[in-house]
Image (cartoon, grey):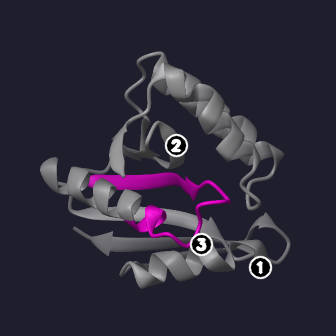
Amino acid sequence: MKIRPVAKKDVSQLKRIIKETPEFDKGDISTCFECLEAYLGGDKTYYFDCAEDNGELSGFVCYGWDTIAKGVLEFYWITVDKKKRREGIARLLQLHVEKEAKKKKSRIIFAETESDDAYANTRKFYKSCGYVEKARVKDFYSAGNDKIIYGKAV
């Protein structure tokens, strides 16, 4: 398994993974596609790296550095092909991003997610990687569905 930057040749596999991610709704999918197009067009706001095994993409991560706060990296998305979940791929991608953060002398990484039950595994994942809840915005996504912001010092 290798981690590498996403290339234009990966778009169809990436779009399939995005569309098949059960946690993603139409808004997530649309926004993720827009960010992917911006990245492939040279926009350095977002970075997309993928996990590849024998030419097949197993998952990807999208992240970027905050343009206002110094030394802050943000996870935007991290997801794994539904057939490849529970194989440690998300953890490999997460560790890759932490390594990139250290290279650029980042001081903290933030990841946000939802309190909805559909994101229970996402919250469990971040906690298992040493991220702690830093903030919660009540009813952000919808009534009863909070935005939870996790952070981890690098």
Residue carrying label 1? 117
| Label 2 residue SS | strand
Between circles 2 and 3, the one closer to the viewer is 2
Residue named by callout 3: 122
Residue name at image x 45 percent, y 69 percent: 88
Closer to us: 105 or 11: 11
Q: Is residue 94 above or below residue 123?
A: above
Which badge, 2 or 3, comes first in the chain's sequence?
2
Magenta stretch, residue numbers: 71-91
Q: In this orientation, does residue 111 appear? A: yes
The amino acid type of the residue labelled 3 equals Thr
Number of numbered markers: 3
Q: Are marks 2 and 3 in contact (CB under 8 Å)?
A: no
x and y percent of residue 60 in the render? 50, 47
Residue 84 lies in magenta, yes or no?
Answer: yes
Name, please, the residue furthest toward the front.
Answer: 54
Q: Residue furthest right?
A: 143
Is residue 34 placed above or below 68 in the rendered structure? Answer: above
Residue underneath mark 2: 57
SS at mark 3?
Answer: helix
